[in-house]
Amino acid sequence: MYMGRVGASPESEIVRELAGARVLLTGLSAATGVDVARAFADIKARLVVHTTDLSPEITALVALLSQSAGEIKLYTDPISSADASVRFAQAAAQAYGGLDAVINLACVSAADMAGVTSERQVEALVSAKLTPLAHLTRVTANRMRVVLNEGLILNVVTMPHPRNGRDTAIASYARAALAAMTKSEAHAWAPHGIRVNAVGPRIMSGTERPEGACLTNEPDVAALAIYLASRRGRALSGHVFDSDNVGFSGL
């Protein structure tokens, strides 16, 4: 869908424009974010990658990314707390003298949802997934503001297609919370030229027919991120794009 807008040719306008762009990617794992990382590396972006997944797959991926990215720096310390987010954002912004795009990844897995049986547990699960994204959004946006740098922040929250009422309730709550956060942060940072968008689970009842575009795989997410980071995406802020059953690929 969005790949058609980006263009497959390496000579496309967006690819040329984003060569050398300073891109922060958080939440990378062997199951989440591989195609996003590859997409920015392939256009010669300078990457700051955060992961707590120290598996052999990630080691191999980082080696692969280093062959195509303009530059790459890897961070592996936990950043879930507000203080840790601030320290990390400062280090990430200083790595290349600023940031042009930030992509924060979070996945609500089937295992995460398995033990959820109450409204309070739904709220706790969604809070655990979104709070780190909120911290990262605010501190990276503030770093952009301090150095007078306009840019994009994209928060991506994915989950399997809902299989039952519990899954639907979690998806609905996560989507609503993500939309509220995105709208608030987009409004707060708009005067500084900083755009905040998100990708969240599509919500449908059993009788509804799908309408409009929907991201269904990680290459779609990667293409959207590149589009939004480019000049063509600068009119878009405060939006939550639909995703459904995005299965993040491994190596």
Image: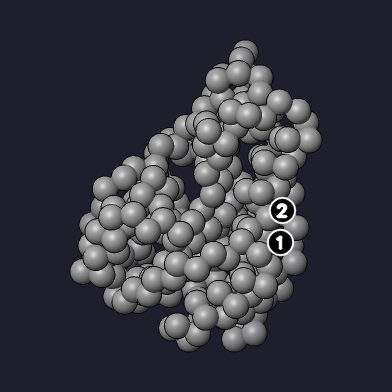
Residue 106: give x, y in percent of width and height.
54, 49
Q: Amino acid at mark 1?
A: Glu
Density class for disc 2 (Cα within 10 Å; few <14, some 14-19, many ≥20) is many
Residue sitting at the far right: 120
Rendered view: 251 above or below 135: above
**Is 122 situated left or right of 149 in this image?**
right
Q: Amino acid at mark 2?
A: Met
Instruction: Name the residue tied to disc 1.
Output: 185
In the picture, the disc for residue 181 is 2
Density class for disc 1 (Cα within 10 Å; few <14, some 14-19, many ≥20) is many
Residue 167: give x, y in percent of width and height.
62, 26
Whole-angstrom CA distance, mark 1 to mark 2, is: 6 Å
Q: Is residue 222 or residue 169 the one in the foreground?
A: 169
Secondary structure of residue under mark 1: helix
Q: Is residue 68 or residue 61 the one in the foreground?
A: 61
- Where residue 44 sits, quadrant-wise, is bottom left
Please tell me which residue is depicted at 34% across the width and 73% down the height of the picture.
72
Secondary structure of residue under mark 2: helix
Q: Is residue 18 or residue 78 the one in the foreground?
A: 78
**Is there CB contact under 8 Å for labels 1 and 2?**
yes
Rendered view: 196 above or below 216: below
Please tell me which residue is depicted at 21% across the width and 69% down the height of the picture.
67
> Residue 145, can we see it?
yes
Please tell me which residue is depicted at 35% across the width and 63% down the height of the picture.
40
Residue 56: give x, y in percent of width and height.
28, 55
Q: Is residue 182 or residue 138 the one in the foreground?
A: 138
**Is 131 situated left or right of 162 in this image?**
right
> Residue 39, can we see it?
no
Residue 59: give x, y in percent of width and height.
29, 61
Rendered view: 9 above or below 240: below
